[in-house]
Structures are given as C-alpha cells and as structure tokens.
Image: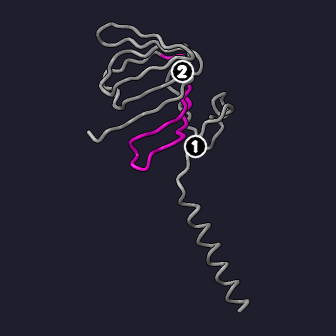
Amino acid sequence: MKYLITLVFSLILTNAIALAEDVVKPAEMSKSDIAGAIYLRSEMTRVTHPNGSNTLDVTNFTSSDGKYETGMYASAASNIEINQPWGVDEFFYVVSGSITLTSDDGSVMVIEAGETATIPKEWTGKWDTEGYSKIWVIYTSDN
C-alpha cells in the first residue's frame, strides 16, 4: 500500500511538472534590461555594418503564431535609405538618443528619448540617427 501511494504521488508530481512547463507566461523587460542588461542575453544579435557601426537586437517575446514580437534594439550613428516598404507595422519607444524619419513626401518627424512612433509596413523614406536605443513592437500580417 505504501508503494502504491508513493507511486501515485510520484505520477501526480511528474504530471504537475510537465503541465507547468506548458504554462503561458508574460514576458518582462526589467528596469535593468531597459538600462542595457538585455544586450547581455545569449540571444542578442550583434551586426557590424560595412561602415563599422554596430547594432544590437534582442527579441524578448514572439507570439505563438509568430506575427507579433517585442524586443529592444540599439544602433550607433547611421543614415539609411528605406527604398522598399518597411515590411512590418512597428511601434517603438525611444529609450535614449533620437531618430529622424523623413518620408518620401519630404515630411520630417523627429522622435527623441521618451517619445514613441508607429511606422506602417508600407512606409519608405530615410532613417537618420546619431545613435539610439528603442523598445520595439512589430506585427507581421499574412499578406
């Protein structure tokens, strides 16, 4: 009888642990992460561009369907022409630095630390910065 009770308890505990691994949990970016610790994560991607500047990118969350993602990105000074549509709907919050977006019609938007912007997936124009860090949220549709 003692063996049977131990066996049943072990099975219950094993199932509880297996179920706990399937629990969906929120993703967090702590104050420390936002201050830069997020770039120490193993999943951080560093890209060195031909001009020698670096960008750092960390995806913090990806939805189960892969269409919605959040993360942080940091860039050194850069000037980029966006000739093809941006490709994703993106909302971002600038943590440090600033970004100047010049749309193809010549309109200019400057986003500074503490401000947000949303870029539609169809956007084209110019992206200029002396360096910045942002928290980003992107949505990719089926089409």
Mark seen at residue 16? none
Q: Pick the quarter of the image with the N terminus.
A: bottom right
Residue 111 lies, in percent from the top left, at 49, 14
Front residue of this view, candidates 1 and 57? 1
Q: CA distance from mark 1 to mark 2?
A: 21 Å
Q: Amino acid at mark 1?
A: Glu
Q: In the rendered image, which quarter is residue 91 located in?
A: top left
Residue located 39% across and 8% down the image: 108
Q: Quadrant of the C terminus?
A: top left
| Dot 2: element | strand
In screen coordinates, is 5 left or right of 67?
A: right
Main SS of residues in magenta: strand
Q: Nearer the viewer, residue 5 or 139?
A: 5
Q: Residue at x 56, y 43 (%)?
A: 27
Residue 130 shows in this picture: yes
Residue 43: which numbered mark, if any? 1
At 56% from the left edge and 65% from the top edge, which residue is drawn?
19
In the image, is residue 112 above or below residue 121?
above
- Tell me which amino acid carries mark 2: Val
- Kindly indicate whether the residue at mark 2 contacts the one at mark 1 (C-beta within 8 angstroms): no
Q: Is residue 129 visible?
A: no
Image quadrant in which you'd find residue 20: bottom right
For residue 94, the mark is 2
Span of residues in magenta: 55-78
